[in-house]
Structures are given as C-alpha cells and as structure tokens.
Image (spheres, rainbow, N blue to C red):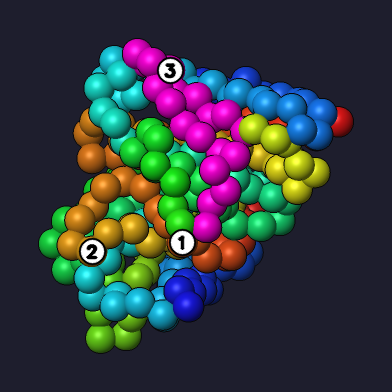
C-alpha cells in the first residue's frame, strides 16, 4: 500500500486533457508545497515533470501542469500526444525527513 | 551533461550484503544531495535514502533503517548504498538520483540514473 493514493489508470484521446490525482494527508501533501510529478516510460528512468506543486523544470512542455487543493495534488496533461503514454508518479515530502510516492498511474492515449 | 551511473547489482542470497555505487559527472558533485530510490519488478517507486552534499545529513525510509547505509566519497564523485541482511522484498531496480539545488535537501530529484538490479534469491 503506497503512502499517496493515485488512480491506477487514466486515458484520453489525442488532443484531449487528462488529470491525475494524488491524495495524501494533512501531514504531507496538505502541509507542504513539496509535491513533485515524474513520468516513466517502460524500461526507462523516471523524469521530473513538476516540482513544488506547480513549477516546471526547463525543457518540460507547458502541456504538463500541477496544482493542489487541500490534501490532493493533481497533474494535468493537456493536448495529449502519443508519447505521453507512460506511468506517472507523484511524490511529496513526508514531514519526517522522508519522501512519499504514490502507487503510480498508467496513462493510455487512445 | 549530467550523468549518474549505478553499478554493483546482482543476484544475492537472503541475509547477504551488497554495496551499490553511483558515479556522477557533469555537475559539481560536492554541492548536491543524492538519493537512492528503488522499484520492485512491475511495482511503483519506493524512496530509500538521501544524503546531503557534505555527507553530514543522512535519512532513511523506515523499511530500510538499520539495514541500509548511504555514504559518499566526494573525491570520487560517488555515492554508495550498503545493503545488509537482504530480504526477498528488497528485490528491485535501485536508482540513484540527484537533488536539484546546490547545498539543499528538498526531497525531490531532477536527474536519475538508469538503475542497477538487485535480485535476492536462494
């Protein structure tokens, strides 16, 4: 059982938008603006998409955006493209010098 | 460009030990914290440990406390993970990853290696 809860799967057609949720508690996601999102293609290393809830590293398309409300963070992928098909993981500072990950969401582009 | 390359994985019997290494290049290694994160086959990411840039701060996941030790040698641009008393549930790809900002530990990673597979089996 993962510390943060994500839906196991999500899907959308090319050009559409999809939002993936990540639910924690008041002691992690709810307390700290330290939520990150990673994309992982099969057999590859994770790649950071979003950090500090809403910030994007240079080189990450603005089609990827993050937000947070209460104990739930979200990643929205707009203008879906075939190459967006991958696993997506959220993470949060856990409050006790640790990192929590979500169980991952498999995004399928229909 | 930034590179982190893990090594040291393999097949090991339960109860035995292993030392994983992560060689970094393309950035000023002495200025950045480093993490180990693992991923069991077909499963999600699982944070293991972090070490600050100077090695003075080390933090671990509860599941590995007392069995795993993170360390670094800044003269060799290398971070290590000593894994002891291995169990079947430690079977995973172990990734080394870099903190994004100098001098700080912010508990997320901007560059990841390709990982090294540890298989615990008799």
Residue at disc 3, secondary structure: strand
Q: Nearer the viewer, residue B5 or A33?
A: A33
Quarter of the C terminus of chain A within the rendering: top right
Residue B64 visible in rendering: no
* Above-or-below relation of A18 to A35: above
Circle 3 residue? A72
Left or right side of B91 for A80: right
Q: Chain of mark 2?
A: B
> CB atoms at circles 3 and 1 under 8 Å apart?
no
Classify residue A13 by image quadrant: top right
Circle 1 residue? B111
Please give the range of residues in magenta. Answer: A59-77
Is the residue at mark 1 from the same chain as the one at mark 2?
yes
* Above-or-below relation of A105 to A59: above
Q: Chain of mark 1?
A: B
Whole-angstrom CA distance, mark 3 to mark 1, is 25 Å
Q: Which mark is drawn over residue A80?
A: none
Whole-angstrom CA distance, mark 3 to mark 2, is 29 Å
Q: Which residue is drawn at the image coordinates 46% and 57% (left, top)?
A: A58
Circle 2 residue? B102
Is the residue at mark 3 from the same chain as the one at mark 1?
no
Is residue A22 located in the magenta-colored stretch of the structure?
no
Residues packed near mark 2 inside 10 Å, few (<14), some (14 to 19) or many (20 plus)? some
Q: Of marks 1 and 2, which one's residue comes earlier in the chain? A: 2
Q: Chain of mark 3?
A: A
Magenta span dominant secondary structure: strand
Whole-angstrom CA distance, mark 1 to mark 2, is 13 Å
Residue at disc 1, secondary structure: strand
Residue B8 in percent (x, y) is at 52, 73
Is residue A63 located in the magenta-colored stretch of the structure?
yes
* Above-or-below relation of B97 to A17: below
Q: Which residue is drawn at the image coordinates 25% and 22% (left, top)?
A: A31
């Amino acid at each position: 059982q993962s510390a943060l809860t994500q839906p196991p799967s999500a899907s959308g057609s090319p050009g559409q938008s999809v939002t993936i949720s990540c639910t924690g508690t008041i002691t992690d996601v709810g307390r700290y603006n330290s939520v990150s999102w990673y994309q992982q293609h099969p057999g590859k290393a994770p790649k950071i998409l979003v950090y500090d809830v809403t910030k994007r590293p240079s080189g990450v398309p603005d089609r990827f955006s993050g937000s947070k409300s209460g104990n739930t963070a979200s990643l929205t992928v707009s203008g879906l493209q075939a190459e967006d098909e991958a696993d997506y993981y959220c993470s949060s500072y856990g409050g006790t010098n640790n990192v929590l990950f979500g169980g991952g969401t498999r995004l399928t582009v229909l | 460009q930034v590179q982190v390359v893990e090594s040291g994985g393999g097949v090991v019997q339960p109860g035995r030990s292993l030392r994983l290494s992560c060689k970094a290049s393309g950035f000023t290694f002495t200025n950045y914290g480093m993490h180990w994160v693992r991923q069991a086959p077909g499963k999600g990411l699982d944070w293991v440990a972090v070490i600050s840039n100077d090695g003075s701060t080390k933090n671990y996941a509860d599941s590995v406390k007392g069995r795993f030790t993170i360390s670094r040698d800044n003269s060799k641009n290398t971070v290590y993970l000593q894994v002891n008393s291995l169990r079947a549930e430690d079977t995973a790809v172990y990734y080394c990853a870099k903190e994004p900002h100098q001098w700080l530990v912010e508990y997320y990673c901007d560059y990841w290696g390709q990982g090294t597979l540890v298989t615990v089996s008799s």
